[in-house]
Amino acid sequence: MFPVAPWLTRRDELNVMEEEFDELCRRHEKGAGDDAWEAEETVIREQAEAEDAMEAELTGRVGPEWLEPAEGCGHDHSHEGHDHGHFPETPLIEALRRDLDRDPAYQQALTWAAAAYRWSRSQYARERHPHLFRASVNACLVPMKVSYALNELMFDDPYSADVADKEFELATTYLSRARVSLAALAAEGMLEGDQVALLERAEDVARDIREARERIARERKFRKNGGAPTV
């Protein structure tokens, strides 16, 4: 189940989210070729295309050094030598402090995504509506991409800020897709009560991601002037 618990570290939460996303992919792969499966395939394909476009753009901008192919559905690339779930070598206390840190963009994304994901998945179990599947997949991806971005910013190299910015950009893309699907469901009268508020709360998530990208822009400038990572 989607992680929202005060005793979990961000690394633990990321592991759970990745497993949840992989499970979505595994369930899809086991499905037959009916209309619902075809709709799911469209969602999976558009996500893969977004990741491929991000990979191609970054490789063209900073070179292939940042890229290390890895197995897995939905997160099949990683910063070279940088496991998305781990931070660079630091003293244990410092590593734990960072791992327990709740960046506003991440906390907002996780809280929103947990509600959106749980609701859309539970509804999809009753009715295989394509927008329910699309909302659940993209909601799951938003905090994952924010977490990847924050992890990248722990590294002091020529391309970590670029990778982090693209991860935040993908988080924005997936958030937008989830919002579009939720709005479509609302138009069909399928959102009620607390679920309607998901559309409003998504704007708060988008704002925090924008602010995080602004911080990265400042970080880029700082690093170009010879500074160390500060974000």
Image: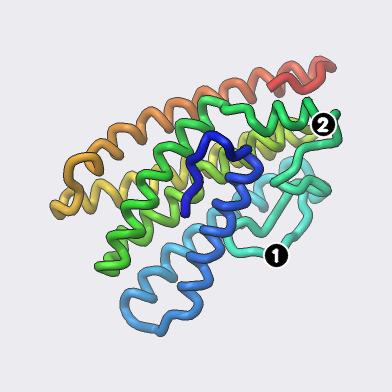
Q: Which residue is depicted at the point 70% across and 28% down?
A: 98
Residue at horizontal 32%, vertical 55%?
A: 120
- What residue do we see at 58% from left, 45% from top? 13
User: Mark 1 sits on what residue?
Assistant: 71
Residue in the foreground of this view, choosing between 59 and 13 = 13
**Amino acid carrying mark 2 in the image:** Leu
Which residue is identified by label 2? 92
What is the distance, in whole Å, between disc 1 and disc 2 at their CAs?
28 Å
Task: Give the side of residue 218 with respect to residue 134, left or right.
Answer: right
Secondary structure beneath disc 1?
Answer: loop
Camera-nearest label, 1 or 2:
2
As helix, strand or loop, the secondary structure at mark 2 comes to: helix
> Within the image, what quadrant is residue 93 found in?
top right
The colour style of the image is: rainbow
Quadrant assignment for the C terminus? top right
Q: Which mark is residue 81?
A: none
**N-terminal of the two: label 1 or label 2?**
1
Q: Nearer the viewer, residue 147 or 211?
A: 147
Q: How far across and how far down the image is residue 119, in percent?
A: 32, 52
Q: Is residue 20 left or right of residue 43?
A: right
Where's residue 215, x and y in %? 61, 21
Pointers 1 and 2 in contact (C-beta within 8 Å): no
Assess disc 1: are there few (<14), some (14-19) or many (≥20) residues with their C-alpha within 10 Å of its C-alpha. Answer: few
The x, y position of residue 8, in whole percent, is 59, 40
Give the percent coordinates (x, y) of residue 194.
23, 40
In the depicted structure, whether residue 222 falls above or below residue 145: above
